[in-house]
Image (spheres, helix red, strand yellow):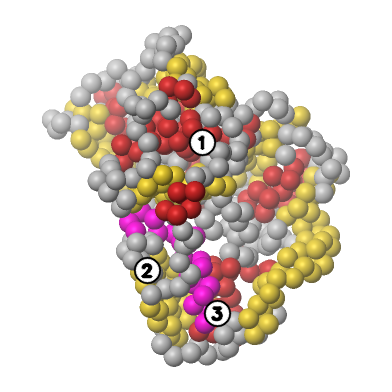
């Protein structure tokens, strides 16, 4: 989630006197959802749909996989980096929220409703303050390369450039607008890693300028000439440095991990989602189409192009490919197109995603391809993380749990810059080994396939960093097999980095695994 607009800085050490207690938020004057359903998000076995999605739709507000940190950020219109305090799990537990609102509700009107929901259902208590926050500070040195614009300041930055350099053309931009939008510029995330940017240039009015910088994520040789985003900013007479800046923040005093129960009315207003499309057409895919693709459009139209049956089953059953067994060869070779229409209102504007259509797609596949399947535990080789000689730091149990891309502290030159072949840098704080094992199955999916389990025996939370290469950074674009000689390019695979840097090891051990067993499936679907 991108940082929100930063309009004004509060002076250092000035603390707001406004305390937003649960009792104040639950007063009768606070706007509320007409009715709301809140429940933990279902556990995902695939890599799809891991991130927050949803928003305002006609007559409702739906969010999927929202953490408490997401909900507070949305409710108060602030950046996640400006939400401090709270329990360690603030950004780990995920919730689905469905709420009913008047049809003419605007996005800004939802904020006080979310605030009331957080106070009433999660017991959230927070207060406003001004606290020092790590941020990128933009200052002016010699801005002779900037050209004053005659426009009103409602400008934009348009990307361009070559295979090696990004060339961003900014016209009619105020400095406030520039720092608000810089994180959305092409490739900027790889330098800023989604951290806050504040304007301390003192420059008024609107400006025209260009920024040329390297596509750092595509740089793999340590000796390559790289022009960083920071270099590009220096060349136009500005400077961006890491700093600790006093900013207005929200400080969480307390919040409950388990929400209060839904009302009986919520069960009536939000019935289970439909399990059938209104109409669907299934036909062999166009062999010339370079797919596959699954497209879900507002209004209820679902288009699947050039999908194998195995891929479609993955989507419908929410399962990874290697956990589907017993299927004949044609599920991996024959490709299909599907055009379907969901019942009216089920995929309204802003609420169209894979979770919405899984039950309908499953029913369609079962009906048209006569699929019969069951779940069964099989003893199979599974990746496990073991602890040989752990090199981990015991975490402060009060610190916030999670992993993020980039160094622990803001730095203009981080390890990925000095050694570009190590293009990934994961910084984890106060994470448990079971949580990290599941996260590693996603982080290292270019190297391994399938679930990763914890077999370290390490209890509690841990701090560490993990630096490794993207798969494409190996010579030939493929990581070497385990036990092979080191790559001459200096690239390090995620499993190799796990062992060398953290003293942990990825092994294959036999474990019971829940598999989807295909008992029957027809090669040709029934007619449309």
Separation of marks 3 and 2 at Cα, in angstroms? 19 Å
Q: Which numbered disc, 1 or 3, marks the residue that appears first in the sequence?
A: 1
Foreground mark, 3 or 2, reads 2
The percent coordinates of residue 387 (x first, y second) are 83, 44
Q: Residues within 10 Å of mark 2 (few under 14, many from 20)?
A: some
Foreground mark, 1 or 3, reads 1
**Callout 1: SS:** helix
The residue drawn where x is 51% and y is 75% is 363
The residue drawn where x is 29% and y is 45% is 102
Residue 278 occupies quadrant: bottom left
Q: Quadrant of the N terminus?
A: top left
Residue 112 painted magenta? no
Residue at image mark 3: 366
Foreground mark, 2 or 1, reads 1
Residue 32 occupies quadrant: top left
**Callout 3: SS:** helix
The percent coordinates of residue 204 (x first, y second) are 23, 21
Residue at image mark 2: 343
Residue at image mark 1: 121
In the picture shown, does residue 424 fall above or below 198?
A: below
Q: Residues within 10 Å of mark 3 (few under 14, many from 20)?
A: some
The residue drawn where x is 64% and y is 62% is 478
The residue drawn where x is 32% and y is 64% is 299
- Are discs 1 and 3 less than 8 Å apart at CB? no
The percent coordinates of residue 337 (x first, y second) are 43, 79
Q: Which numbered disc, 2 or 1, marks the residue that appears first in the sequence?
A: 1
Residue 241 in view here: no
In the picture shown, does residue 290 fall above or below 180?
A: below
Instruction: Specify start and end residues of the magenta stretch as a single range.
Output: 348-367
């Amino acid at each position: 989630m991108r940082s929100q607009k930063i309009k004004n800085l509060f002076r250092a050490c000035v603390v707001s006197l406004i305390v937003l207690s649960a009792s104040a938020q639950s007063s009768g004057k606070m706007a509320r959802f007409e009715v709301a359903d809140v429940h933990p998000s279902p556990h995902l076995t695939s890599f799809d749909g891991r991130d927050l999605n949803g928003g305002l739709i006609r007559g409702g507000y739906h969010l999927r996989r929202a953490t408490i940190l997401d909900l507070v950020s949305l409710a108060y219109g602030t950046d996640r980096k400006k939400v401090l305090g709270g329990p360690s799990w603030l950004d780990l537990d995920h919730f689905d929220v469905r709420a009913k609102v008047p049809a003419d509700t605007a996005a800004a009107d939802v904020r006080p409703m979310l605030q009331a929901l957080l106070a009433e259902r999660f017991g959230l208590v927070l207060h406003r303050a001004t606290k020092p926050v790590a941020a990128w500070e933009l200052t002016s040195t010699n801005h002779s390369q900037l050209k004053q614009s005659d426009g009103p300041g409602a400008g934009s930055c348009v990307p361009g450039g070559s295979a090696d350099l990004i060339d961003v053309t900014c016209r009619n931009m105020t400095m406030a607008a520039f720092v608000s939008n810089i994180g959305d510029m092409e490739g900027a995330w790889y330098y800023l890693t989604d951290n806050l940017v504040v304007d301390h240039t003192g420059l008024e009015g609107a400006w025209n300028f260009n920024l040329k910088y390297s596509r750092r994520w595509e740089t793999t040789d340590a000796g390559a000439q790289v022009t960083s985003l920071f270099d590009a900013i220096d060349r136009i007479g500005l400077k961006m440095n890491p700093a600790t800046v006093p900013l207005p923040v929200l400080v969480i005093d307390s919040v409950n991990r388990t929400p209060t129960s839904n009302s009986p009315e919520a069960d009536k207003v939000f019935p289970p989602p439909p399990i059938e499309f209104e109409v669907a057409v299934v036909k062999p895919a166009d062999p010339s189409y370079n797919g596959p693709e699954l497209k879900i459009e507002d209004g209820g139209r679902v288009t699947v192009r050039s999908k194998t049956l195995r891929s479609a089953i993955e989507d419908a059953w929410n399962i990874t490919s290697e956990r589907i067994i017993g299927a004949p060869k044609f599920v991996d070779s024959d490709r299909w197109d599907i055009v379907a229409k969901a019942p009216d209102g089920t995929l309204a504007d802003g609420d169209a995603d894979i979770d919405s259509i899984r039950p309908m797609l499953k029913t369609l596949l079962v009906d048209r391809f006569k699929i019969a399947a069951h779940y069964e535990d099989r003893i199979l080789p599974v990746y496990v993380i073991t602890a040989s000689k752990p090199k981990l730091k015991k975490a402060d149990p009060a610190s916030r749990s999670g992993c993020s891309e980039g160094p622990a502290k803001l730095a203009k030159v981080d390890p990925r810059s000095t050694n570009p072949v190590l293009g990934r840098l994961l910084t984890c704080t106060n994470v448990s080994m079971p949580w990290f094992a599941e996260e590693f199955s996603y982080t290292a999916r270019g190297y391994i396939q399938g679930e990763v389990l914890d077999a370290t025996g390490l209890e509690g939370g841990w701090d560490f960093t993990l630096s490794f290469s993207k798969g494409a950074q190996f010579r030939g674009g493929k990581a070497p097999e385990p036990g092979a000689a080191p790559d001459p390019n200096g690239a390090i695979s995620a499993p190799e980095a796990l062992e060398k840097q953290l003293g942990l090891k990825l092994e294959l051990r036999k474990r019971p695994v829940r598999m989807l067993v295909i008992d029957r499936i027809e090669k040709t679907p029934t007619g449309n």
